[in-house]
Every structure is written in C-alpha cells, then in structure tokens.
Amino acid sequence: MEILAATRGLFDERGVRDAQIEDIAQAVGINRAIVYRHFTGKEELFALTVVGYLDEVREALIAAAQTSPDPEERLKATVTAFVDYGLAYPAFVDCAQTLMRRTGPELLDEISESALFRLGRAISGCLSVLSGVFDEGVTSGDFAVSDSNLLANQFYASALGSLALARVGILVGESAPGIPSVGTVTPEQVRDFLVTTAVAIAVRGN
C-alpha cells in the first residue's frame, strides 16, 4: 500500500519520532483524514510498517541459516544477519521497541485485530527460523536448549535493546565506587557480544 511505503520511507529517512501523520499524508499526496480511514492511528501504522521490516528480516535469516551445515556456524550466521539488519535499519529497531512497550490488551485498544494478527505472524515467522536453528542443533547433539521458542523470544527482545545500545555508542560504568565513567562501544562489539552470547546459551542450555 502506498501509505505504508511512504511511512517506511519517512521512518528510514527521518527516524520514527520525527515522522508524523501529516508528513506521511503529504508524502502520498492525500489529506491526513484519509490516512485514518485506512488505519486506526499511528500505532497501527507502526505495527504494519514493522511487518514490512520483519518480512525482510525473515528472508535474511532464512538465507543465513542455509550457509553452513554446522549448527554453531549456522547460529552465528543467523544472529549476525539479524544484527546487521538492525544496524542498517535503525527505524526497525525503534518501531519494534515502541510496540514491545505495550501489553497485548493495550495494542488491541490501539490497532485492529487484523493488524495485530499480521504483526504476530511476522514476528513468529522470524522467530521460527531462529528456533529451528536451535532445534536442529539439539537434534545433532550440539546444543542443549530446552525451550527453543523461549530462547528465540528472549534473543529477539535482548537484541533489540543491544541494537539501541550500538546506536547510542556509550557505555556507563564506575571509575571508582559512586563515580560514574563513560566509555564507548562499537556496533561490531555489540554484534560480537550477541553472537557469542547466543552460541554460549545454546551450547550450555536455557
């Protein structure tokens, strides 16, 4: 749909916070009232725009999961693909985090059931690729994961937070008790951390 394409374009260009309904309507060449005829509000636009991002993420994950027969290498490639996508499209991270801050009932109050279904299907489509990698590793005896779906969901949530950290690029610590210090972190460090952590948990078990 043209409205969703315009929303995605503005998100990628300006970021989520700076893209308003008026801007989206103007980009399509319509009145903002027409936007509200198709969507319940900005939250539904967020949700359906995230669906577009997630469809691309799923394709990237599927391709990554087919790069090696070795379970550990396949997991590394899959996690790397997710992180690299989030680094390339920070608006995806912002949209996904915005939606995760709301409970299911809150989302139902703000977006239609059909939009929520599409969002859930898009998220589960991505998570099923990752949980499939975990399951294959368990079958081969390389992983000790007891609940692959739980681990995939945990990774999704934690990776989104880590990707936000990568964008900020700042680490806060203590140089002495009670004395804060500020350091830096690179996207590459965040990527390496997420890959290493995913492999360690998969091998050790959750």
Image (cartoon, rainbow, N blue to C red):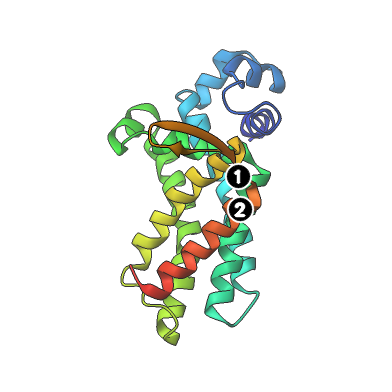
Examine the rendered structure and indicate whether residue 114 appears above or below residue 40.
below
Figure quadrant of the C terminus = bottom left
Q: Could you tell me which secondary element the residue under label 1 belongs to? A: loop
Three-letter code for the amino acid on which mark 2 is drawn:
Gln
Residue 132: x and y in percent read 46, 71
Name the residue at the front extreme. 176
Q: Is residue 1 above or below residue 67?
A: above
Q: Say what amino acid the circle numbered 1 marks.
A: Val
Q: Is residue 112 left or right of residue 56?
A: left
Judged from this view, the residue extending furthest toward the left is 105
Q: Which residue is mark 1?
A: 185
Q: Nearer the viewer, residue 77 or 49?
A: 77
184 and 130: which is toward the camera: 184
User: Mark 2 sits on what residue?
Assistant: 189
Q: Are marks 2 and 1 in contact (CB under 8 Å)?
A: yes
Please tell me which residue is depicted at 47% across the width and 23% down the height of the picture: 41
* Inter-mark Cα distance, 2 to 1: 6 Å
Q: How many marks?
A: 2
Q: Which mark is residue 66?
A: none
Residue 187 placed where, x, y %? 64, 48
Pointer 2: residues within 10 angstroms few (<14), some, or many (20+)?
Answer: few
Which quarter of the figure is the N terminus placed in? top right
In terms of depth relative to the viewer, which is nearer, 2 or 172?
172
* Number of other residues with Cα within 10 Å of mark 1, as a class: few under 14, some 14 to 19, many 20 or more: some
In percent of the image, x 59 and y 43: which residue is there? 166
Residue 137 sits above or below residue 54 on the image: below
Q: Residue at x 57, y 82 (%)?
A: 70
